[in-house]
Amino acid sequence: MSGNHLSADTFGDRFELSALPLSRPPAGYAVQQLDSDLLLDRRTGELLPIRTQGLAALFASFDDAFEAASQWVLQHCDDPTEHHLAIVPAGYDPVFERPILIYGVLCGQP
């Protein structure tokens, strides 16, 4: 099963960063685990806390983030519908050299 077998909205609705009214400038797309500050690291393919030194969590496109999230789900979830991941816009703090969750920690349930 590859990422293209997951539905297009598996990790939320597709969006373009330039179309969002954001309070901070976006630096890319990130894959966030809901109810946490864990982000998918591009290099290791693991979910790591946002304050992890050297975390490479920013993806250049929604498609890149979708593919990485899909691979994580296929490797870690017995039931792909129970993944608790979302693709979100993220900023970057050059002082602390880490990503910023523009929307903060997203809840899995309203």
Image (cartoon, rainbow, N blue to C red):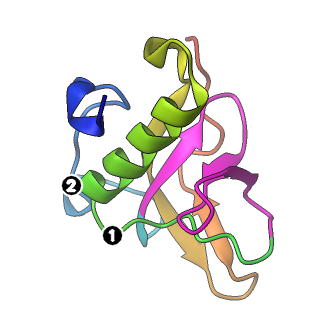
Numbered disc 1: secondary structure:
loop
On screen, residue 65 versus residue 32, left or right, reads: left
* Picture quadrant of residue 106: top right
Q: Residues within 10 Å of mark 2 (few under 14, many from 20)?
A: few
Report the magenta residues as a range: 29-52
Residue 34 seen from this side: yes
Residue, disc 2: 16
Whichever of callouts 2 and 1 sits on the residue coming sooner in the sequence is 2
Residue named by callout 1: 60
Label 1 Cα neighbours within 10 Å, binned few <14 / some 14-19 / many ≥20:
few
Looking at the rendered structure, the secondary structure element under dot 2 is loop
Q: Examine the rendering and report whether any part of residue 8 can be seen.
A: no
User: Is 50 located above or below residue 95 in the figure?
Assistant: above
Q: Residue at x 80, y 66 (%)?
A: 52
The image position of residue 94, as x and y in percent, is 64, 87
Tell me where residue 22 sits by quadrant.
Answer: bottom left
